[in-house]
Amino acid sequence: MNYVLRILCLLMLPLFAHADNLRPGDRLQIKLPGETAFEQSFQLDHDGMITVPEVGSLQLSGQSLSQAKALLKQKLSNAYKDLSKFDLVLQERRLSVTVLGYVKQPGPVDLPVRANVQMAINSAGGLAQGAQLDKLQIRRASKMIEFDYKHYLDSGNPSALPALQPMDVIFVPASPLIGNVQVEFDARTLTASGDAGKDGEAVKVFGEVHRPGTFAYKSDASVMDLIMRAGGVTRYAGIEQIRVIHNGQPFPFNMREYLDTGNPALMPKIHQGDVIFIPQASEQVKSGARTVYVMGEVFKPGAMEMGEDSGFYDLLATAGGPTRFAETRQIRIIRANGSVQAFDLQGYVDGSSRRNMPKIEPGDAILVPEKTDMNEKSWLKVHPNRAVRIIGAVNRPGRYEWAAEMSLMDLIAHAGGPIASADTAHLQILQQREGGHTESVSFDLKAFLDNGGDIRKIPSIRAGDTVVVPELPKDPNDNRSQWVRQSSDRSIYIFGEVGAPGRYAFNNELNFLDILSAAQGPTGLADLSGVRITHRRNGKTEVTHLNLHTYFQTGDESMLPVVKNEDVIFIPKRDREWLERPKETVVRVLGAVNRPGRYSFDTSMTVLDLLAEAGGPKNSALQDRIMVINRIDGEAHSRLFDLVDFAKSGDFSRLPVLRPGDTVYVPSKEQSSWYRFVTTLQESLTIFSFARLVGL
């Protein structure tokens, strides 16, 4: 017995080995501790390949797990030295098949190993409309299996579906009902042309119906039943002239009369093979003693007969009412005698118009005009006596239709509002007056929006007026052709050492720091202690001085001057020509210093600050004989200062007092008597040595 079992195991071993071979879709786990590139799983693609880091693509389909492990270990040994802990594990069996034909997303799909045909179709996006469900195919190598998928959907019997194998191709054919042309349709499209079976027993319905086609005959069906099965008549149907053709003989049917009377005897009897034709209503010019015409933007324009009690509303409603493009504020009644009467329907409905409803007489015409398209280039549709213009810095400048209740705010909003650079503080309204004259009215819209106010103080506008929204000037360095439009009485000037000197728009809400910031602030060479502001008031000028250094140190807002329009701000440059500085505001440093010159000085500074600003004494300076020269009551005085002795003692009380206008002199060693004696002696010895040399 054991011998027989052994023989059977040996015979079936190749089968089990073949079943364990790798195939497309299988997920493998490559274990190589310490390598993050192998932490995720690797799946065999549709061709049985995997892509391994440092190795590339490898063909593993058809190999056993041990064979694949040996191949991978051989390839990885070229890149990794330690493969003692390398292992290859089959993580998951997957089923890789391809779904083609009438599905929403044809192509290869990856499925669980026990997946069926329905799961494969759902993975491909589901069936597309027009798929033939009873003749699905599975193509496996050279073999094709055809099965009825509709039977499975009806019964739910899983045995109706063939089992899937790797690399199978599922093909979903198209139904022959969709024809040979690819079209978009919904689920009702296939039956839109009728539901008839045999042609000889069908009834054909065509003409002005919504769904003409061939329909199955029913013995109790009437003409109305078949017309309803065809979707009913269209708005263009001539229902008084319907024809039922039986055995080549036409029988008329007046559907309107039937609907008015309800008499079933008016309907012809329907037989198998009959044809029902609904013609199109013929267009004829209508005229009569009580004809009224409705034209323009209504749903059903045309001529219509008015009754004794018919009014404006009755006629407008019979014409279908105004469309969404109708300008109901400008309706015109064209009388039979040629006169024209205007009527504001919207104002009448809102209650803002006090005019009565116009009385309509036979022969009159009602014209409902079209709204003016904002994007249309032609402006001739709006007559000048009902137009207002807005130009300048708004998003949509142009010519707009005016109404009596329109305000300035309505017009600006209709034009898209001001743009970012609009000067809303100086709006101008050019109002027409009698005799062709115009009057300019200014309005500060910015102040009104910021602070509010009496709405009655907003200037009123009328047809023919023009609203101008000026634009703020741009940087003069960028565009000189635009900033010149800014008037001087609304400008302030800033010159000197700032980032962008020039002329800037200014108003009462801005201050000195605002205009300095607008000019991009002082440059690195600016002398912040000598800022000057020229105030121009009523033809007079006044100059004030500002030390920005002190303001930045103290933050005292009272130091900042009040600037107004037309003022001039000048920020000088440091180390400018000394002639620009009055001598009474500087201290002079002369002699043996590294940077002699004139320096700005204030009472908070000492002689040490001044010497440091001048670069300090030179090596040849007599630092114990520094002279400080000043004037007291008009007389010159000098004082000796020993810098060496001060450095030893550190007694600040011994520092000389300096004032603007003083002079500090640092003598050099060359000016001392001893230096002169030594220099003379050296020169004498040099001459004596040269004489002896010549004598020799």
Image (cartoon, rainbow, N blue to C red):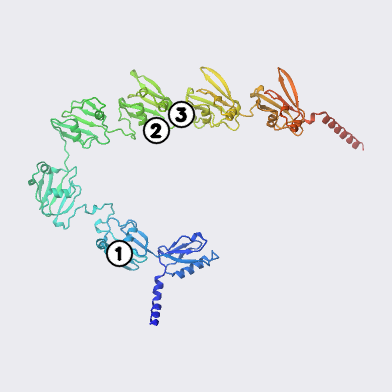
Camera-side residue of 271 and 555: 555
Q: Which mark is residue 395?
A: 2
For disc 2, the neighbor class at 10 Å (few under 14, some 14 to 19, many from 20) is some
Q: CA distance from mark 1 to mark 3?
A: 75 Å
Mark before the other along the chain sequence, 1 or 3: 1
For disc 1, the neighbor class at 10 Å (few under 14, some 14 to 19, many from 20) is some
User: Is 619 rendered above or below residue 126?
Assistant: above
* Residue type, label 3: Leu
Q: Quadrant of the C terminus?
A: top right
State the residue lying farthest toward the left: 265
Q: Which mark is residue 137?
A: 1
* Residue type, label 1: Gln
Give the image quarter of residue 123: bottom left
Residue positioned 14% across, 49% down in the render:
225
Q: Which mark is residue 472?
A: 3
Residue 44 rendering spot, x and y as whole percentages: 42, 63
Camera-side residue of 126 and 440: 126
Q: CA distance from mark 3 to mark 2?
A: 15 Å
* Residue type, label 2: Asn
Secondary structure state at the residue bearing disc 3: loop
